[in-house]
Image (cartoon, grey):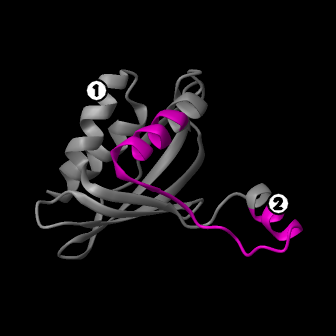
Amino acid sequence: MSKELADRYVALWNEPDPATRSALIRELWAPDGNQVLVDPPEEIRAAAAAIAFPVPPLEVHGYDALEARVTRAYEMFVEPGEHVFEAAGEPSVLLSNVIAIRWSMVSTATREVVGGGLDVVALDGEGRIRTDHQFIGAS
């Protein structure tokens, strides 16, 4: 089950059709599911520090916010045709309901890995994502 979930999770971020993306989000995540970007980009951390705030948590909650998050990532990284997301190895079952999914952002021109990360997802009793902690740049 973890391999199927990981494959569907990674495919979601490459999905060009908005209706299919929306349906996949509703299949993969629990209604109250969320995603947390654990280590925000340096420019966000610097902007927060400049006004004396600690690093802000970047979180989205619920289907609409998840859909906006996934859609924006698709628009930024996949839609221009320069990159695609791919699973990077097999998922790891950390606990009975916690799975680690490694992924890479790959250049479509050279097939070179140009980025990647790790998502640690906790599942609810129905096998849907309740929490997704995303670590960009983790190997």
Tag 1–tag 2 contact (CB < 8 Å): no
Position in image of residue 136 (x %, y %): 57, 58
Residue under pointer 2: 47
Badge number at residue 9: none
Identify which residue is drawn at 17% across, 75% down.
96
Q: Which residue type does callout 2 highlight? A: Ala
Q: Is residue 53 above or below residue 69?
A: below
Residue under pointer 1: 20
Position in image of residue 40 (x %, y %): 65, 61
Residue furthest to the right in view is: 50
Q: Nearer the viewer, residue 122 or 84?
A: 122
- Mark 2 neighbour density, 10 Å: few (under 14) some (14–19) many (20 or more): some
Identify which residue is drawn at 58% across, 33% down.
77
Q: Which residue type does callout 1 highlight? A: Thr
Which is more foreground, mark 1 or mark 2?
A: 2
Q: Is residue 24 above or below residue 56?
A: above
The quadrant where residue 119 appears: bottom left
Q: Nearer the viewer, residue 42 or 88?
A: 42
What secondary structure predominates along the stretch shown in magenta? helix
